Each structure stands twice: as C-alpha cells, then as structure tokens.
Image (cartoon, grey):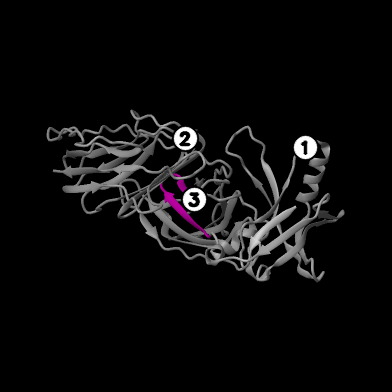
Amino acid sequence: MEFNIKKNGTLPLLKMQVVDDGRDEFDSFMSFIETSTIYFSMIDVETGSYKIHLEPAGFVEKTQIEPNAKTEYYIYYKFPKKYTSKVGRFEGEFVLKNTDGALILPIREKLYINIGESNLSDDIDVNYNIGLIASISTGSTKITYTLTSNIPVEFNTTLNFTHTLNTYTGSSITITTGVTINSLQKIGSVSLILNDVDYFNLTQQSSFSNVSVSPVGLTNSVDITTESSFVQPGLTPTPTPTITETPNEPTPTPTVTETPTETPNEPTPTPTETPNEPTPTPTETEISNITPTPTQTPTPTPTEPLVGPTVYIDPVYGSGSSGFSFSLDIFLNNFNQDIAAISLIIPYDNTIHTPTDVTSILGGSFVYQIQPSEIIIYWFDINAYTPNPSIPIITITLQLGLGIDNYNFDTSPGNSEVGDINGDPILPITFSGSTIEGI
C-alpha cells in the first residue's frame, strides 16, 4: 500500500477504510475500534528509526449523498509539517489500544509513505474557514445555529461549543451543544427551543467558549469565527460581537450535549435538537405581492430575456404605500440539473424599507438572517430539489418606507451561489434583482 505526500505538506489525509464485508468480524472489529485509542507511527526505512512514534490518530465516518448507500468508516492521520520536512520513504502503521490489548494495522500488507519534493504551489494547504452564526428569536426563545464552510468538508465535521446568553435579571443562560456539516457539504444547522427562557430578559450580549472541532486531525487547518444575532418580529436584528475562546488542544472525542445547562437559581431550558439532519420548517406567510392601495404600479416586463441558469427577484419593479407590506419572490429559472444548496446575500438600505420576514417552500435546512444592511439566506438538503421556474422558492416580506431601494444579489465570490447535488457551485449563473419604491 503506497501513500504519497509532498515535502512540508499536511494534506492529503492518510486514511484507511474499514471495509464492511458483511461478516460478523466487521461488527467485532468496529466494536474494538470504538473502545480504542488510535495512534500512528512511522519508521524511516533507511535508518530503521522512528520519525513518528505513537502520535494520536482518529476515526471518522463519511456519510454518502445517496440515501441507500452504506456509510464508510476511516482511520486517519493528518501530518504536521514537522514530520514531512524530509524527503524519503517510510513505513507506517496504525496502533489501536484498549483494555483487551492492541491491534496493528494494516494486517495483510505494509503501508509505505513516500515524501517527495514539491514546488511552491504544492506547499499551499487547503484551509477550512468555518463560521458559526447564532440567530436568537422571540416566541418561545428559539436559537438557530448555522455552521458554514468555505469549501465542502471531506468528512462529517462537528463544531462543539458553549454559548452563554447574558440576562438582565437572574443567572445567565448557558448552552452546550454542537453543529455538524455532513461530508461533501458546506452548511449545517441545528435549532433549539428554550421554552422557559424569556427573550426580553436577554441583554442581547453573548459569548462562545470551549470551542472545538472534530475530526481532530483538521484542527490545524481550520479558522473559526462566531457571531450572534438577536431577531425581533418587525424590527431590524441586532448583531452582537461574541468572544470566542479557542483551545490549543481540543478534546480528541468531543460529544454534543443535547440538554443545555444553566447556572443555579434558574430553570434549565430543554431544547429540541436534531443534530444529524436539522430541518427547520419555515412557515410561509400569505402576503400578496400587491399592496391594497390604488397606487400600486404594474410590474414591467424585463427588457432582456434571462438566459442560462438564473436566480431572479419578482417583481423587477414594484411600488406601494409607505407602511404597507410588500413581498419579493425569488425564482430559479433555466436550471437543467437538481440543486442541494443555496447561499444568497442581498444588500439593502435600512433607512428606506424594512425587511420583516423570509420564508421558503424548500425542505431540509433553511436559515436566514436580516442584518442591518443585508439579508443572508442559507439552504441545504441532503435530498436534491428540482427547480420549478413557475414556483418561487423564497419570499422576502418588506415593510415599505418612503423612497426607492434596489434589492440586488451580492455576487462577490462565495456570497451568492447555487450548489449542485455534490455541493459544487453551478457556473455560470445569472443573478437579477429588483427595485422597490415606497410612496
């Protein structure tokens, strides 16, 4: 078995698949792995000396997009640069230890690692930029945690953390939980319902601590940012800066605590959480695109036809009386393939009209944020969606003010995109916005 990596490289991951051959030995082997500590060692074949000796390794599962496909399991090790600084040939092995003994892998053949010369471009590692957004809203206090990555993750990747919400009276609210992005995807989310927490007792200040990411082998190539946003119906949300405490050595096997813990003297909130496949189902508000005023201006027809895959807002132009509600519908047109992810950012002038709600017909995980100057929309589903050009997928509700504002998509790289079933952006794609006037 041969594995190749460039000098001073940290990727690709060295991984060995645990093959399910349908025999009883597989279940026994999996049980052994799950109760073991996993190490990796590497010996220089020329000198016979250890280059790496019993360094911590990991175990991870890779969920397939196809619902009926079997889950794959891998033992892996991620090389730090200090161990790939020398060109050469090495023999590697994984060591699994538990109370029953030790097991050395691979069993039937040797594993050789070849460290080769590289040029400058080979030395550039892929970095994961992962952002966590907490959106806290009223009703029974609801928190939606949305985790996004700049590129699809190779394995199921979980961010564990403690989120503390400050309160005006009583003890602060402490929530310990985690969010997972499934393999080959870029977005994951989970929602918690805190029935016993009064939203209006929250000071709209919060902080994150005990932040860790798994698989552990990815930690030195992940940049993490966190943010909180407090949303009240009919008002512009208030984003709040958060303090993120990132440990140098995250826990090798982090666990997600499903029940939030709260400091004494306050009742413990009990969230409803679905960590594997969160599917917050938005409620669609039946609001007409035309306000009930005699001053409504008919929607003009676009002067140019929309060609190729297009995301557009209808109406292209609309108007209504100040103080009334107005709806913007987002359509997908000319898509000849299924989609599984959407990321949209729509800037706006908050001194003119006020966005109040965003709803969607899409299943899966749908999350939005109404920021002071932009609307952020994320959607992801493990099941593909076939775009129907006659059905709006998303509706944005505005409260009209006085004046004219443009609602165009931010098409900067990575801001507005539609992903296929593999999570890859569909290119090329056209985005077309709208102009709304309040009179």
**In the image, 406: left or right of 121?**
left
Q: Is residue 306 above or below residue 169?
A: above
- SS class of the residue under badge 1? loop
Q: Is residue 167 visible?
A: yes
Main SS of residues in magenta: strand
**Mark found first going from the N terminus, 3 or 2:** 3
Q: Is residue 290 above or below residue 270?
A: above
Q: Residue at x 21, y 50 (%)?
A: 352
| Residue holding disc 3 | 145
| Residue holding disc 2 | 363
Q: Nearer the viewer, residue 149 or 5?
A: 5
- SS class of the residue under badge 3? strand
How far across and how far down the image is residue 109, in percent?
81, 51
Q: Residue at x 14, y 35 (%)?
A: 297
Q: What is the C-alpha distance between the residues marked 3 and 2?
A: 17 Å
In the rendered structure, find residue 21 and report the number of the disc placed on it: 1
Specify start and end residues of the magenta stretch as a single range.
127-144
Q: Is residue 191 above or below residue 83?
A: above
In the rendered structure, find residue 386 and report the number of the disc placed on it: none
**In the image, 392: left or right of 44?**
left
Quarter of the image with the C terminus is top left
How far across and how far down the image is residue 143, in percent?
47, 49
**Mark found first going from the N terminus, 2 or 1:** 1
Q: Which residue type carries mark 2?
A: Gly
- Residue 328's image quarter? top left
Foreground disc of the pair 3, 1 = 1
Q: What is the C-alpha distance between the residues marked 2 and 1?
A: 35 Å
Q: Nearer the viewer, residue 380 or 396?
A: 380
